[in-house]
Image (cartoon, grey):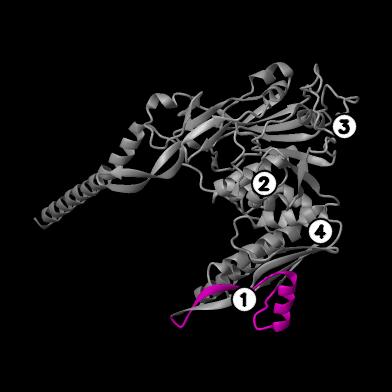
Amino acid sequence: MNQKRQTIIRVILIIGILIFLNIVGIRLFTRFDLTETQMYTLSDASKNLVKNLEDKFLVKAYFTSELPSPYNNHKRYLQDQLDDYRAYGGGNFQYEFIDPKDKEEIEKEAQAYGIPPVQVQVVKEDKMQIEKAYMGMVFLYGDKKEVMPVMQNTANIEYEISSAMKKMTATDLKKVGFLSGHDEIGMDKIGRLKQMLEKQYQVLPVSLSNGQPIASDIAVLVIAAPEKPFKSWEKYVIDQYMMKGGKVAFWLNKVKADLQSQMGQPLQLEMDEMLESYGVRINTDLVRDVRCVPVTVQQQMGFFTMQNQIPFPMIPMASEFSKNSPIVKDLGTIIFFFTSSIDTSLARSKGLQVETLVKSSEQSGRQEQFFMINPNAPMTKDLFSEKNIPLAVTLQGSFTSAFKDKQVEPDTTLIAPIDQSNKQNTSVDTKIAVIGDGDFIQDAYAGNNKDNLIFATNLIDWLADDIGLASIRSRETGAKPLDEVSEGTKSMVKYGNLLVPPILVVLIGVVRWRWRVSMRKRLESREL
């Protein structure tokens, strides 16, 4: 009887402890996040944003109840994230989940916010059915509103919430200007990058056609893949924008490659001397790399023409990143399309701070002077004798003007000559980012590799002195490549997988057989 009573008391105690721990867990939440990128932990940037809210920030999440997997997990994950925000929000962060199922008024409200119904597949009574569901959110702050129409996945929900919060709480959005007038990439070709940037910035084209200075409220000027040469006065306008503290991204092609003709031609942009005065040079070459993207080519097989995928070293898949820079932290791979190498040796004597963000792999090389880009061309080992060729760099410090000791060349096409009366020969502390490829941000080339766009956005954040959200944006990166191993290691792993399992089975069989023989002899000796 006493034993039964003790058992009951123990069960009650265990249940009580579990209830107590549950209550403590709700009140004093914590999380053991073992992921490499801490993707389940609220970042410092998000904590600071929510702590500094000056007014009520309301999240209305329209989620249909009883959704099938994996959508039901989305709701749970979202609720955990919103709980974290609320815990740090000091009462200014609030959220509510609303179920529009079979409620016409609520459905109208969700759709009025711009949250449409979506169709999801569910299994009921052993039959596959299509049902209507809502999985969107609206963020409300004062008289401002931001909408996330559909929550596709949980990969980067923190970035979506924090970027909306940052945009809505900012008094003025910084401006990012994309230079036009030299056959640069048009806004219509970088729709995905523009969409990402517009979560934090006002994105607009910048023209030099009127000869006026670049507006001082342009936080970052992006020069992406121009094809026409720059005139002297145009370079002067860009130079003086820099001298006054403007930040510039030089994403330039030095060789125009055409896969159709399988040839490349050097581009004459007339920017070399200007960049060299800033301590950097984009070489007129094309980097080839063993770690590269495959392309589909036609190959003759006897009487047949077959389409095969073969690796194309002229489209490197770069994954050697700076270990210290938040710009490339947690990125997987960046795909460059016919990129040129970068030389920063000139910066040493200018006292500038240089960082190489992206390099080629341990097996790479360069094509110079004559540019044949035939994917079927034979590749030998000696073509990949170089390693870690710089592909993307940043420089910061006080730059010397490219026009310090010279005047702007006259241009009769201008209505009025350029005013050089207030020329500055030395800049205040500023930054530039240089990449030998301007096409890596194009929708057509970036494809499904979101790392290209994250890299470009992080770079602009860094230039705009607003790198905070870069750490959580990079959590949504693609798969990281496996580490390169030697041929000897590959053979060892291969034969280890083939031989070790059967050898273990045989050893276990021998041990078991010897143990049974030993047992039998022991029993026989006892009977005797």
Where residue 347 appears, as percent x and y from the top left, is: 69, 20
Looking at the image, tell me whether mark 2 or mark 4 is earlier in sequence order: 4
For the residue labelled by badge 3, is the local secondary structure a helix, a strand or a loop?
loop
- Give the residue at x 59% y 25%: 283
Q: CA distance from mark 2 to mark 1?
A: 43 Å
Looking at the image, tell me whether mark 3 or mark 1 is earlier in sequence order: 1
Q: Amino acid at mark 4?
A: Gly
Q: CA distance from mark 2 to mark 4?
A: 44 Å
Instruction: Tell which of 435 and 190 is nearer to you.
Output: 190
Residue labelled with disc 1: 65
Q: Amino acid at mark 1?
A: Ser
Q: Which mark is residue 224?
A: none
For the residue labelled by badge 4, is the local secondary structure a helix, a strand or a loop?
loop
- Give the residue at x 73% y 44%: 468
Where residue 26 appears, as percent x and y from the top left, is: 68, 64
Local packing at callout 4 (Cα closer than 10 Å; few below 14, some 14-19, many 20+) is: few
- Give the residue at x 73% y 82%: 105
Residue labelled with disc 3: 416
Residue labelled with disc 2: 186
Q: CA distance from mark 4 to mark 1?
A: 29 Å
Looking at the image, tell me whether mark 2 or mark 3 is earlier in sequence order: 2
Q: Is residue 203 left or right of residue 392?
A: right
Where residue 423 appears, as percent x and y from the top left, is: 87, 24
Q: Is residue 102 magenta?
A: yes
Q: CA distance from mark 3 to mark 1?
A: 67 Å
Residue labelled with disc 4: 90
Q: Is residue 380 magenta?
A: no
- Contact check, label 3 and label 1, Cβ < 8 Å: no
